């Protein structure tokens, strides 16, 4: 835990920017033509299906405010979108290809409505393949949409066998889905109902899901089916991914087999995320995923730093990676309540600016995240240890004397005015 100085003007500035950005489109930050030494920084919102809107809003506010606190050019969201859309997105493990797949599905539907079936098939096939390779618990709802869309497009393109296969997969993914008879033509409804009937052909059982505390969301194969306690009386025989999730508790995922005529149950005590060892919001695998994604974005944009922003419930996290040293600063985590979100964004922005000024070579063990310590050659390749150079101690002595004198002068000139600064806790994870 560290304390950073929080200036009132930062909070006011961010409050204005946060309000304004909801009313008018954002503009790209001006290029620092007169300052070639400015850092190039990318600020990117993580898309993981959890508080994505809040993550995007926070990232936008930080893009606007960071250049006022740091000698930096923050790359506009529009430019980042264009560059990343050109390359196939390697998204974080938590999102499992979600952002890229959403774009494929959207384009597939556009081509379908324009009767460009070949283009539509290419886009939707790419989305299905990407989502199928990811984590079903994270992408279930989107995969269902992709499969049903693939079935509709395939039927229109005359590829009935592919349409049947898509509907079969959709029905097995979510056997509780009821197709809307008003939204689809009879031929599509007939194919889907035939697939759904085949899913139940081997029999059905019962599935009960409970949790402590109650009223936790229950996702089956990544699709929300209700809250605990939940009883599903007609579940086709098979194996299902069951995730139980609620705010402020660590989610739990289990694989459950349901037999024909049998009863399966899952009952879990959820772990409070803020107590002791469970205070970590993300595990090491997710931390590494963020670091890899941040470096990928920095490489594509040729940026000095990339920042991944993620809002999750009442927390906001920011992870900054350094492209030169292939390293990640320690993650910043701050409270992000509805009443204090402007202040939280201001605090995180100020801390990011402070971190960006740090020379990582001075003390990599202090500043770097252990999940991504960077290029070992760059971080340990100095010819001689810093403290073994005699000239350094002379410089330190002179600097110390200057610092003491400067501190005394600064303290005396401040006049004891404490109304301009405050103490705000920001946690490094």
Image (cartoon, rainbow, N blue to C red):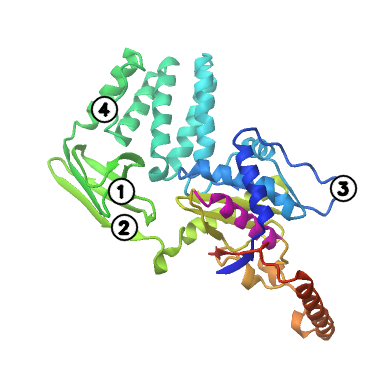
Work out how far the residue at label 4 is from the one at label 1, CA to CA, in angstroms.
28 Å
Rendered image quadrant of residue 200? top left
Residue toward you, 149 or 307: 307
Q: Secondary structure at mark 2?
A: loop
In the rendered image, which quarter contains the N terminus?
bottom right
Work out how far the residue at label 4 is from the one at label 3, CA to CA, in angstroms.
64 Å
Which residue is labeled 2 in the image? 270
Q: Dot 2, how many residues are within 10 Å of its Cα: few (below 14), some (14-19), or many (20+)?
A: some
Closer to the chain start, of discs 4 and 3, is 3
Work out how far the residue at label 1 is from the one at label 3, CA to CA, in angstroms.
54 Å
Q: Secondary structure at mark 3?
A: loop
Residue lying at 25% horizontally and 49% vertically, measured from the top left = 256
- Residue 24 place in picture, x, y as percent: 64, 32
Residue toward you, 291 or 182: 182
Query: Answer yes or no: do the residues labelled 3 and 2 have beta carbons within 8 Å?
Result: no
Which residue is labeled 3 in the image? 34
Work out how far the residue at label 4 is from the one at label 2, CA to CA, in angstroms.
33 Å
Rendered image quadrant of residue 379? bottom right
- In magenta stretch: residue 314: no
Q: Dot 3, how many residues are within 10 Å of its Cα: few (below 14), some (14-19), or many (20+)?
A: few
Closer to the chain start, of discs 4 and 2, is 4
Q: Main secondary structure of the magenta part?
A: helix
Which residue is labeled 1 in the image? 216
Q: Which mark is residue 196?
A: 4
The magenta stretch is 339-356
Q: Nearer the viewer, mark 4 or mark 1?
A: 1
- In magenta stretch: residue 345: yes
- Residue 295 place in picture, x, y as percent: 64, 53
Q: Secondary structure at mark 1?
A: loop
């Amino acid at each position: 835990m560290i304390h950073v100085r929080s200036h009132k003007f930062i909070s006011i500035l961010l409050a204005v920017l946060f309000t304004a950005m909801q009313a008018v489109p954002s503009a790209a930050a001006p290029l620092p033509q007169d300052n070639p030494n400015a850092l190039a920084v990318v600020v990117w919102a993580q898309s993981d299906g959890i508080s994505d809107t809040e993550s995007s809003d926070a990232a936008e506010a930080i893009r606007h405010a960071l250049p006022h606190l740091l000698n930096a050019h923050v790359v506009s969201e529009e430019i980042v979108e264009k560059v990343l859309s050109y390359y196939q997105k390697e998204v974080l493990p938590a999102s499992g290809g979600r952002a890229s797949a959403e774009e494929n599905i959207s384009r597939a539907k556009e081509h379908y409505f324009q009767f460009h079936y070949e283009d539509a098939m290419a886009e939707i096939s790419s989305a299905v393949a990407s989502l199928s390779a990811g984590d079903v618990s994270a992408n279930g709802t989107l995969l269902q949409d992709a499969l049903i869309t693939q079935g509709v497009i395939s039927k229109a393109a005359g590829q009935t066998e592919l349409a049947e296969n898509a509907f079969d997969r959709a029905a097995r993914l979510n056997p509780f889905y009821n197709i809307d008879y008003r939204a689809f033509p009879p031929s599509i409804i007939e194919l889907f109902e035939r697939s759904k009937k085949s899913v139940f052909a081997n029999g059905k059982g019962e599935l009960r899901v409970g949790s402590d505390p109650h009223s936790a969301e229950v996702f089956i194969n990544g699709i929300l089916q209700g809250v605990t306690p939940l009883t599903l009386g007609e579940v086709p025989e098979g194996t299902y991914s069951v995730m139980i999730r609620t705010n402020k508790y660590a989610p739990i995922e289990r694989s459950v087999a349901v037999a024909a005529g049998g009863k399966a149950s899952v009952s879990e005590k959820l772990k409070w995320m803020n107590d002791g060892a469970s205070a970590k919001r993300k595990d090491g695998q997710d931390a590494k995923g963020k670091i890899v994604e941040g470096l990928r974005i920095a490489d594509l944009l040729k940026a000095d730093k990339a920042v991944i922003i993620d809002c999750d419930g009442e927390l906001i996290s920011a992870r900054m990676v350094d492209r030169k040293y292939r390293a990640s600063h320690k993650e910043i985590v701050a409270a992000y309540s509805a009443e204090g979100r402007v202040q939280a964004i201001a605090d995180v922005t100020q801390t990011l600016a402070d971190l960006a000024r740090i020379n990582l070579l001075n003390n990599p063990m202090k500043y770097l995240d252990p999940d991504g310590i960077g290029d070992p050659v760059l971080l340990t390749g100095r010819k001689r240890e810093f403290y073994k150079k005699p000239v350094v101690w002379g410089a330190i002595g002179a600097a110390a004397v200057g610092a003491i004198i400067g501190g005394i002068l600064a303290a005396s000139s401040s006049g004891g005015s404490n109304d301009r600064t405050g103490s705000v806790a920001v946690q490094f994870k």
